[in-house]
Amino acid sequence: MRDRQPNGTSGRGAPHGGAGGGPPDLNLLRTFLAVYRSGAFTAGARMLGLSQPTVTTQIRALEGQLGRDLFERLPRGVAPTPFADELAARIVEPMDALGAVSGPGGLLGEGEADPVHLAGPAEYLAHRVLPTLAPLLDRGVRLRIVCGLTDPLLDALRAGRHDLVVATARPRGGTLAAVPLEDEEFVLVAAPVWADRIGARVATEGAAALHGVPLVAYAEDLPIVRRYWRHVFGTRLTCTPAVTVPDLRAVRRAVEGGCGFSVLPRYLCEDALAAGSLVLLNDPDDAPINTGFLVQRPGSSANPHVTLVRDHLIRAARSA
């Protein structure tokens, strides 16, 4: 669908009304928001439980009412026209508010709200999220939690399989709403048996003091450790891991057992550092950090419990 006139206008209608002067159908606006937020007709249809041809027909009907083109087809998905951006800005808040009171569990709904589908890294969910959930359960919230890597989870979010995703990076593009959740600091740690042997040397020799010490890592390409080396030591990491295991909790346990050294999020090893089963090998003034984001599925605010969970997770992260 391409603009009929420059700037996405055809000279007929305006963002606040249709070509004939009457208000657009609310169901059509709901479909428009689903496509606008997901960036594709297919993903929007999946979110709404409709067929892709039905969504295409509804978008064309809305364009006919408004007298404007709303989307331009791309090789993958669609791009909103400037008119669509303006329309979305005008209707998103009232449409989301209407969905919250008329959807399942809302003021006009019947029965229980649907479960909230939450996804994110297993380590963060286990240590930062799951221990805080009791107040939500007291309010009748039901949760379905999935663990995984950020990119596949965001793809599943766009496809409508999750409501909220804790992501290790801000999603690319503007189709998903993301808010900063928490900064995780990375720390260089080892068990006392290794700290006693090399701890003092790290302070004077830097990365060279770790040559010959086994490295325990999350993955073969060492994304976390390489980042620490660049940021703190200003050098390229050249060693290969002695042990890899795709779970940071397991990495921590291996390091506690004396297998070698690693770089871990501080939240994951705070208790071990306090107990002395792990020791900081280095404590730079400017430690590397990574910001996590809470990403919401377009249109999921129709379930009022999604908003409860979202706000709870943000409060819990900022009070940690």
Image (cartoon, grey):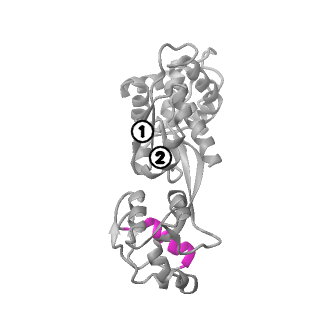
The rendered magenta stretch, by its main secondary structure, is classed as helix
Label 1 near label 2: C-beta < 8 Å? Answer: yes
Q: In this view of the protein, can residue 176 be seen by the observer?
A: no
Q: Counting residues from the N terminus, which is met first, the one under dot 2 or under dot 1?
A: 2
**Residue matched to label 2:** 125
Q: In this view of the protein, can residue 297 be seen by the observer?
A: yes
Res 289 → quadrant:
bottom right
Is 227 included in the stretch rendered in magenta? Answer: yes
Residue at 47% x, 83% y is 197
Is 100 included in the stretch rendered in magenta? Answer: no
Q: Height in image: 88 above or below 217?
A: above
User: Of residues 18 and 176, which is closer to you in this image?
Assistant: 176
| Structural distance between the alpha carbons of marks 2 and 1 | 9 Å
Residue 260, position in %: x, y? Answer: 40, 73
Residue at 65% x, 46% y is 319
Residue 15, position in %: x, y? Answer: 64, 27
Residue 268, position in %: x, y? Answer: 50, 57
Q: Height in image: 71 above or below 15?
A: below
**Residue matched to label 1:** 145
Element type at mark 1: strand
Q: What's the amino acid at mark 2?
A: Leu
Q: Which residues are magenta?
A: 221-234
Q: Height in image: 200 above or below 61?
A: below
User: Of residues 92 and 112, which is closer to you in this image?
Assistant: 112
Q: Which disc number belongs to residue 291?
A: none
Element type at mark 2: helix
